[in-house]
Amino acid sequence: MIHRGIATFGLDYGTCPRWLFERMVKLGRHILEVIVQEYGPDEFIKRIADPVWFQSLGTVLAFDWNASGLTTILTASLKEALRGKEQEFGLFICGGKGKTSRKTPEEIQHWAGILSLPEQQTNNLVYNSRMAAKVDSALVQDGFQIYHHCLFFSRSGAWAVVQQGMNIQNQTARRYHWYSEKITDLVCEPHSAIVSQRLSPTLDLTSRQSAQTRKISTELVQGGFNCLMKDIQIIRKYSCSLSKMVSFSPADNQRFTLLHLENKEFRLHPVLTEDFYKSTYLEKILSKVCQIKPANYEQLLAQEGVGPKTMRALALVAEVIYGAKPSYEDPARYSFAHGGKDSTPYPVDRKTYDSTIQFLQRVVIKSKVPWYEKNKMLSRLKVAV
């Protein structure tokens, strides 16, 4: 079973032709209507959080299978398809690409006011949206910069986040999926599924293998700024004189520090020298969070100003001084294939394979579009899955 969700694609440039976008909006509206009528809005939220289904839907609506633009154009076309029908369908889409992504909290508040949602439910939606973005930028440090963020939610409170990051150097994009019903801990393996090639190295602070790192990082800031700085000064002293700078990862172009302390060699760790040794901003943020004394790792990450540099620095101290090794494995596990006859990347899951095809086939056949359009969509579905 696939448990987590990241997808990698070639990075596209240019814009979507107007005729194609309008066609996707039209077809998307029909598909949304069938799904809501037949299965309810919560089923759509569940489906959109599945990266394979999401990718299949984008392909059925006439976009390229492996294009990074599928994410941004599909979410934009669905948002447009819902315009004026949000309350009728019980579905709401907030955010989008670039500057639009930063309007997500504002758009959530807008719909909350119209729907008279309880304040707690509204605050939870805003918080979960913000934390999803923070986790995928600060805790899953894979070299991808988040540039697209979209929150889908239903009137009943089910929600999903679909966001995408880009890696300019290797010209790829990666998509991250979140689903409310699958999440038990926002900072420990919270994604809904994973379908991507692995990249190396990656500092994955959400991994269960990084549990001790998360625990010690929290204890470090709870222990006070002076104690934390003593540990940092030890690392600075020894690593500045004995470290070797290594050009290591073409995937994210980060330099890694090989640390030697008390005649022990520590593994490569993704903390840039300019981040750790010369950053007064880092010390300012650490001083701030040490005063706040967050109760847990999630609260630590949630603090304003805390980002990837802060979490990397704390992970370095936890590893070098206290021996808590985080995970350096990319959380991505599988490609988009349902499986292979030779069990690569894993045995064919016929049930999942058939259900993906059958669900979208039923939706397309029941949609109110001309038969020639249905035939095109069904044809593309066969290619997609």
Image (cartoon, rainbow, N blue to C red):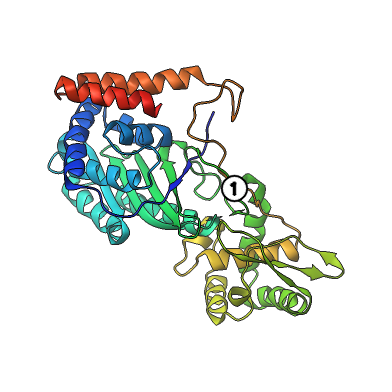
Identify the residue at horizontal 19%, vertical 39% (top origin).
25
Asked if residue 277 can be seen in this view, the reply is: yes
Q: Quadrant of the N terminus?
A: top right
User: What residue is shown at x 25% (from left), y 47% (from top)?
Assistant: 76
Q: Amino acid at mark 1?
A: Asp
What number of labels is visible? 1
Tell me the quarter of the picture where residue 159 sits.
top left
Q: Which residue is mark 1?
A: 330
The residue at 60%/47% (across/down) is 207
Q: Is residue 5 above or below residue 143?
A: above
Q: Is residue 350 left or right of residue 371?
A: right
Q: Is residue 6 above or below residue 343?
A: below
Image x and y of residue 32, in percent: 22, 32
Work out whether residue 290 or residue 150 is closer to the camera in this orientation and state it.
150
Give the residue furthest to the right.
Answer: 263
| Helix, strand or loop for disc 1 | loop
Residue 41 % position (x, y): 27, 32
